[in-house]
Image (spheres, coloured by chain):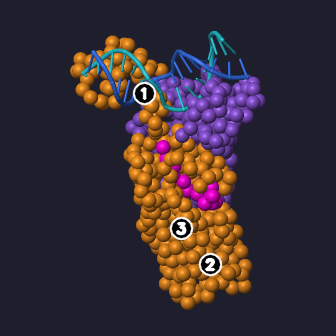
Chain colours: A orange, B purple, C blue, D cyan
Amino acid sequence: MATLKDVAELAGVSVKTVSNVVNGYSFVRPENERRVKEALAATGYKPNVGARNLRRGRTGFIALMVPELSIPYFGELAGGVITAAHGHDWSVLIEQTQGVRDAERATLASLGPHMVDGAIISPEALEKADFTQHASGIPMVLLGEHALDVPIDHVGIDNVRAAQVAVRHLIGMGRRRIAVIGQNPNRGTATQRLAGYRDALSEADLPQAPELVATAMRYHHSDGAAAMARLLTLPEPPDAVFCFNDMLALGAVRAAAERGYHVPQDIAVVGFDNTEHSAYSLPSLTTIAPDKTALAHAAVDLIHHRAGGDNGAPQDIQIPFTLEVRESTTG
Amino acid sequence: MATLKDVAELAGVSVKTVSNVVNGYSFVRPENERRVKEALAATGYKPNVGARNLRRGRTGFIALMVPELSIPYFGELAGGVITAAHGHDWSVLIEQTQGVRDAERATLASLGPHMVDGAIISPEALEKADFTQHASGIPMVLLGEHALDVPIDHVGIDNVRAAQVAVRHLIGMGRRRIAVIGQNPNRGTATQRLAGYRDALSEADLPQAPELVATAMRYHHSDGAAAMARLLTLPEPPDAVFCFNDMLALGAVRAAAERGYHVPQDIAVVGFDNTEHSAYSLPSLTTIAPDKTALAHAAVDLIHHRAGGDNGAPQDIQIPFTLEVRESTTG
DNA sequence: TTGAAAGCGCTAACAG
DNA sequence: CTGTTAGCGCTTTCAA
């Protein structure tokens, strides 16, 4: 690989001049500029990003920590983050944790200022203590999760309100025995969505039946299917289910169909995330649609501000959402 | 941030000694080792990966270039690559190209040896010329695409044979008028799958009807739905469709259902990729299932070998696949 | 076994 | 406008 020095020798100038040309600094005598450019082309010079960053004290990377990229929601989110990061000349490093606390903690600990300029993290099982131990020294933003009261920037949607909207919609469609799938004491977002669900029920003077709250450890189709199967064996099965993500919902829809239930006639289903599949499933899925692009941009911009030296109080940015009403609740 | 020098001063030894302890080299006098370890703990020292790599001439990163992370297949693939890369102490940098040639070319050009130790690339529109221009100087492996005859390691499945298997299955189920969705002259894999489809048809002495080959520029649900809609307006619509990925297939299934066709009774559908959704859709989707975990591991291992100095002839690794037979062809 | 010092490729003072 | 030079933090000869 050609270095700055090689180019300088070939062009018969100093490294500084070459560096100036490469970085577009100050005024270089046209004659020199031409020679440098020739030498640059001749050697096929490409700057050593590592060395440059070592010198500049930045790395050019930001990290994104997610449970699993194979979950469409996180795939879509990661895509958005990469796009947004490019706007600030950042490349994105992605780490997966499977939502396991130890893995999350380990990843957090590995994130030093020499490795990345900032981190966007989507915690699943992290606790407050995990943060205070490692003052990593880089800007961080938390996604989704917000039960955690740590003094760190946060961007997400109002989960309580989103759940309320979803359940109100179900109530509005005449449903009275509404279940949820996805309860999980380790997930802050689950707790919030459950709260919203309860609010909507009491608001409408509907009873809260504990047997209608189905837990899910993971949020894949199979978990949704298993939960739905359990709900349908109840002496008095639900007439609607609000699921905490689209995969749970789609799994639940399938499980219902397998047992001869029609969605939405016998049982209505609402999902969460509005991943691409939800618009094309049979029936298509009514779901909460967070503005993922806005989410990704807000997170990256926040890192950018902090990296630029903004030390203000931790921010909490609320991203808008809508309820996409589709066939799974309206038939 | 504490540097090696800070630690050395605190411990009253030279940086060399600290470096030795940190890297577990040679024998350090126990007394010194203890003092160094204390100093390490006291300062909370963490090595500056950038500086270390600058010195060692490696970066600790590999790049993964994909069209879009929001396509579940690539999300699953990326997850596998990250997992496999961890086994070699690599972090993974992900770049998206949207399958646009200029973006792919630009990404390729940006991949220098100072930025990443290797690259796994999933090209969509890249041409041979795009590779020879930038001898990037890092190990690369190509995924999927193989029409490109460039002297670069490749790992993928046998697309021709996979398509054959899929179409033979359809023929075996008694279908006679079989369409494909996903033809695209810019995609090498599409060309191969089309060839396999043709092979299977001639093998069974079935006629090749040009109107049954539906093109798709992108491979999302909407493209599959649009293509299916077109096919169904044919004077003599197909009785089966082989789609070049699962999203196209699921979009096609929905479009068929919207027009009153039953899958598989009226029209059978086969997909490609076996993404998680395909097992839970209604009907569940018969699809070609490449071993994605094996694919990811093979790619990363190949990079690892090359980075270790293996200069042998370019390899071409074939990953096994199966046909997952589900309801969309068997009802 | 440990220290001193060179240098990876680059940028930025500071001269000139 | 351009050259010289000192590091960024680390590893690694080469001596001691």
The image quadrant that residue B86 belongs to is top right
Is label 3 in a helix, a strand or a loop?
A: strand
- Whether the magenta-drawn stretch holds residue A106 is answered as no
Q: Is residue B102 left or right of residue B79?
A: left
Chain letter of disc 3 in the image:
A
Quadrant housing the C terminus of chain B: bottom right
* Coordinates of residue B305 in the picture (x, y in percent): 65, 28
Mark 1 and mark 3: span between their CA atoms? 45 Å
Kindly indicate whether the residues beneath marks 2 and 3 are on one polypeptide chain: yes
Where does label 1 land, which residue? A47
First to last magenta residue range: A117-131
Tell me which residue sits at (73%, 26%) in the image. Answer: B28
Q: Same chain for labels 1 and 2? Say yes or no.
A: yes
Say which residue appears at 66% left-offset and 62% top-offset: A218
What's the residue type where badge 3 is placed?
Answer: Phe
Q: CA distance from mark 1 to mark 2?
A: 58 Å
In this rendering, does residue B120 appear at all?
no
* Picture disc at residue A272: 3
Residue type at the position of mark 2: Ala
Q: Nearer the viewer, residue A262 or A52?
A: A52
